[in-house]
Image (cartoon, helix red, strand yellow):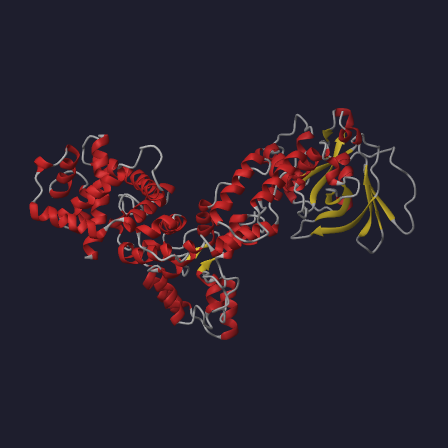
Amino acid sequence: MSLSSLSRRRPAYTDQYSYVRGEYAIGDEKVPYFSISMTIREADQYLRLARELAFSDDEPVNLEELFQRTVDEDRAAGPIATYLRQPGSLKFFNAFTVVLLPVDPDKADTVAESYIEDSAAPAETPDGDLERTSIGPVQIDNLPGTDIGFIRWSTKLARAVILDGQHRFLALKKILDSPQTNLLKPDTTKIPVLLLVLDERAGFVPARDQDRLLHACRSIFVALNKHAVAVSKTRTYLLDDQDIVSVSMRRLLTSEVGNGRDGQDSIDRIPLALVDWHSDQAKFDRGLHLASVLGLHETIRQIYPNRCDESDYEGLREYITKVSALIGPTGDSRWSELALRNRVSKYEDDALPFIFSAEEVSAVADAFASGVGQAIVRPLLRLEPYKKLREGYQAAGLIGGPLELWLGFDKYGKQAFQTRTGNDPSDLARSIAENVKSGDNAFAVIFQRGILLSAVRFDTARSDFSGEWECSSDRFAVLDRWIERMNVRVAPYLAHPDFWLGTGIKGDRNVNYTKVGANGVKGLVSLAVMCPIVELTGNAATLSEGGISSETLTGSEQRAWKMISDPDSPYLRDDRVMADAAEHSLQFAAYRWLAQQFETIGRGRAPGVVAGVTRQACIEYRNAAKAYVQSELRASGLPVDEEVVLQGVLVLGARRLAQIAQASV
């Protein structure tokens, strides 16, 4: 038997707890409560979970009540218990809501309909001027004219049942029954408790259809959970100081809105007013914003290695190594890979969950923001049409001017600004945003994510692409070259849905809001910036001069050439706009180049970084385009042959690359 179990042997009555009384008196109903505090040891001794109660056989139990009686053991043993065990972090819970329910000890502690009088209740006179109200097994001593006093109850005739806080309570119990019980300091740590006594003698006024105690209890049971509002993800990401991804995201944004920020930052940051930080929406294709907190957070989450459980010590060591590789040498003493790995080992020896300190998280976020994070910031500031939106706002004073406060506020802040200044820039801002954003896929969240992750890909491989692209040794030279190529090669087509068929756009011309769609955009964008335009145009000129004879082509090339050259071909009929956009010889030259890149797929480990980037881009593009080509073949009544699908995928991509090459000449 555990020490905790021994401690739960209850005396006839609890100690007297000092209380402050309050009540919810909204409408005709009144729900009084008594605010007390008790030690964790006392809570373990006196408080009970709803699932421990027995209900009368003739009293039905509804679905909501059944759900409330179910406690998620994994949640209690996982995140909450981990939070309590974490060293170096403040611990605080809001109050437990507890109802004192009458029970009948002669019926296996079944919940009774009303409080049963207790002939064995303590009969001593209350101290001083206190006046006692006895409600069956509950004694309330009150100082007249005040809301303070003392309360106690019989542990035989009443049960203190937790209505709100069951998972927190179970987490406390699990630690209390473990070798780490002293971590809680259970005899000195006190928790807040709100006691409900649902009886008219305590001031309770029930609703007309809930005059029976159990009905009233059920109503509160359900309402506490049904109407609880979880903290929004956006707010969590903006406030969490222990999550590396959240803090890294915030480091990419200016810390305030308003005029006068120019020149204050040593690195580029995204103006906070351009980001939707107040709603819980990832999408920003409509409205005034350039990006959203939810969208940016998910993008950055995909850049970092996957975070493991706080007790997966081997996984934590691997995570630390990968994060160190991502941010590179920092020169910041707050983050030391060796010291962190040693600390993980110490926590492993002590069987404690490991968390990063606020200083360590801050060090990673600072290094991220000044390094690879610029592959998020710079494209959002310099890529068309993001640049066009920002510059439009700047010209109107909505960024870096007197109206930036308005742009950065939520709707209530905007109203206050308008009331104070008498200026309502809504129409001006809306006109600028609609002029830039209307129909432009750059403002679809999956397009933005695919574009930004492509930028990150090339920035992390910069040492290899600096030679490929003949860049300087500057830290961001490859990223800047990527932006230049994007603005010339890809940005002109972001508002053209046909260009993105099979990647970010589905056959019905709607955005493909899936991870496959985002990866398809990333793959096509990456191939577009890598594509050797001069080589393609030269090869196309050679093909055009000599003509293309089917006798000189392989079987796969013959099939591809038929798709490209025959306007009546049943293949890819829905792609007619792009089929007619570039010369056939240029499309075929692009097909050959793309087919050559696809040969890197499935050949074991890539021979180098550039080959690895190429392979991954091909896989991402192929996986997205494959589904589109298959659906097109089925719609045309053609067999979905694997070789035909592959050639369709290649031709689909070749048409886009050919269009880019033709426009670049």
The image quarter containing residue 621 is top left
User: Image quarter for residue 73?
Assistant: top right
The residue under the point 32% across, 53% down is: 441
* Residue 159 position (above or below residue 405): above
Q: Nearer the viewer, residue 36 or 258?
A: 258
Q: Is residue 635 above or below residue 108?
A: below
**What is the x, y in percent for residue 581?**
17, 51
Which sits in the foreground, 58 or 317? 317
| Residue 312 seen in render | no
Figure quadrant of the C terminus: bottom left
Q: Nearer the viewer, residue 55 or 371?
A: 371
Name which residue lies at 36% across and 48% down: 464
Q: Residue 171, image x and y in percent?
A: 67, 36
- Relative placement, left or right, of 301 versus 135 is left
Residue 172 located left or right of residue 481 = right
Give the position of the N terminus as an image quadrant.
top right
Given residues 508 and 572, the one toward you in this image is: 572
The quadrant holding residue 375 is bottom left
Q: Residue at horizontal 84%, vertical 40%?
A: 15
Tell me: 463 left or right of 10.
left
Place of residue 400 in the rendered image (x, y in percent of width and height, measured from the top left): 45, 70
Residue at 17% x, 42% y: name it.
573
Picture coordinates of residue 127, whole percent (x, y): 91, 47
